[in-house]
Amino acid sequence: MEKFKRLKNEGNDFVRGGEYEEAANKYSECMKLNTEECSVYTNRALCYLKLYKYEEAKQDCDHVLQIEDSNIKAFYRRALAYKGLQVRKKNMAGI
């Protein structure tokens, strides 16, 4: 559990510094230790949104909502992911 907290804190520090790829990697390491901790999924979803990885963000939020069906952050970030996916579809249609 101590390693999990350390990795999560490192991920949070990377987010604060705008280093979203590194933060996502730390949260992924956390998930190997605890797959039921929703905060690392919503945190990684935030990183994916910042990296324009909308499908990955949506998947993380879907996972959280299977565990906690009223998680507000997961709903909000999933909505942002859907919005990003729609914008991408519109841009691809115009090419």
Image (tube, rainbow, N blue to C red):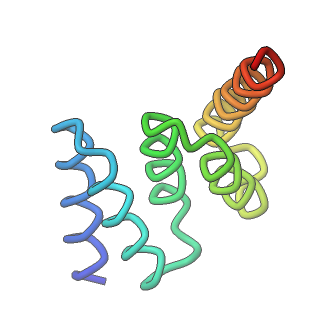
Which of the 4 image quadrants contains residue 47? top left
Q: Quadrant of the image for the C terminus?
A: top right
Is 30 in front, or is 47?
47
Outermost residue, right side: 93
Identify the residue at image location x=31%, y=76%.
Answer: 4
**In the visual, does 43 lie left or right of 66?**
left
Q: Residue at the spot x=58%, y=73% of the render?
A: 36
Image quadrant occupied by the N terminus? bottom left
Give coordinates of residue 51: x percent, y percent.
44, 39
Farthest residue, direction front: 95
- Could you say where residue 29 lies in the image, as x and y percent from the top left? 37, 76
> Relative to 20, is 89 above or below?
above
Instruction: Name which residue lies at 68% across and 47% down.
Output: 55
- Tell which of 69 and 64 is nearer to you: 64
* Side (left or right) of 41 relative to 55: left
- In the displayed structure, 79 sits above or below 38; it is above
Where is residue 88 drawn, in percent x and y?
Answer: 70, 26
Q: 21 above or below 37?
A: above
> Residue at the top extreme?
94
Q: Residue at x 66, y 27 (%)?
A: 84
Q: Is residue 10 left or right of residue 83?
A: left
Q: How many marks?
A: 0
